[in-house]
Image (cartoon, grey):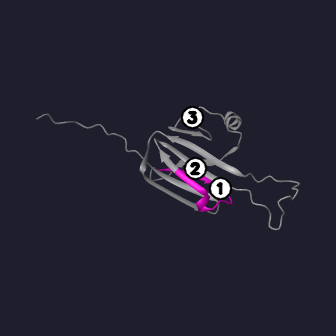
Amino acid sequence: MYYGVKSSCCGPGESLAWRQARDQETTHPVPVDVFENKEGEYVIRASLPGFRREDVQVEFEDGVLTIAATRHEDRAEGAAPTTRYYLQERAQGRFERRIQFEKASGEAIRAELKDGVLTVTLARLKEAQPRSITIE
């Protein structure tokens, strides 16, 4: 079912594989949940464990919410630059997610980062109500 919300980890019309090949760098997708709260607002919850507030950017333009974050390589404490890792699964680099909203207002946006979860709240546009016009 379509609710007027579209999601992407890359630009319009781009697949992740195509973008990786084009940019020669990896952009990691950000896992999100999108739902409507009891006030009728859109709520987006994004998993960003280990990110600091200053590493996260939230933008809303032309109906598209962009959540981006950057994690720079952090060597284990005491590890020399030539340290040989046997397993390194924690992703480094840029994380990004774009979500398009057809009926969201950019006027009242709230964002909070707590315990590795970014919560963004967007107000919905009011639906135009039919009304009768008196002719003078």
The secondary element bearing badge 1 is classed as loop
Q: Which residue is mark 2?
A: 67
Q: Give the position of the N terminus as an image quadrant.
A: top right
Res 30 label: none
Q: CA distance from mark 1 to mark 2?
A: 10 Å
The secondary element bearing badge 2 is classed as strand
Work out whether residue 115 or residue 91 is closer to the camera in this orientation and state it.
91
The answer to whether 101 is drawn above or below residue 39 in the figure is above
**Of pointers 1 and 3, the one earlier in the residue sequence:** 3
Q: CA distance from mark 1 to mark 3?
A: 23 Å
Residue 16 left/right relative to 66: right
Q: Give the position of the C terminus as an image quadrant.
A: top left
Packing grade of label 2 (10 A; few <14, some 14-19, many >=20) is many
**Of pointers 2 and 3, the one earlier in the residue sequence:** 3
Work out whether residue 127 or residue 32 is closer to the camera in this orientation and state it.
32
Taking the spot 60% from the left edge, 45% from the top edge, the residue there is 97
Res 12 label: 3
Residue 27 % position (x, y): 67, 44
Taking the spot 62% from the left edge, 39% from the top edge, the residue there is 10
Residue 122 left/right relative to 70: left
Q: Which residue is mark 1?
A: 48
Q: Amino acid at mark 2?
A: Ile
Range covered by the magenta-colored residues: 41-58
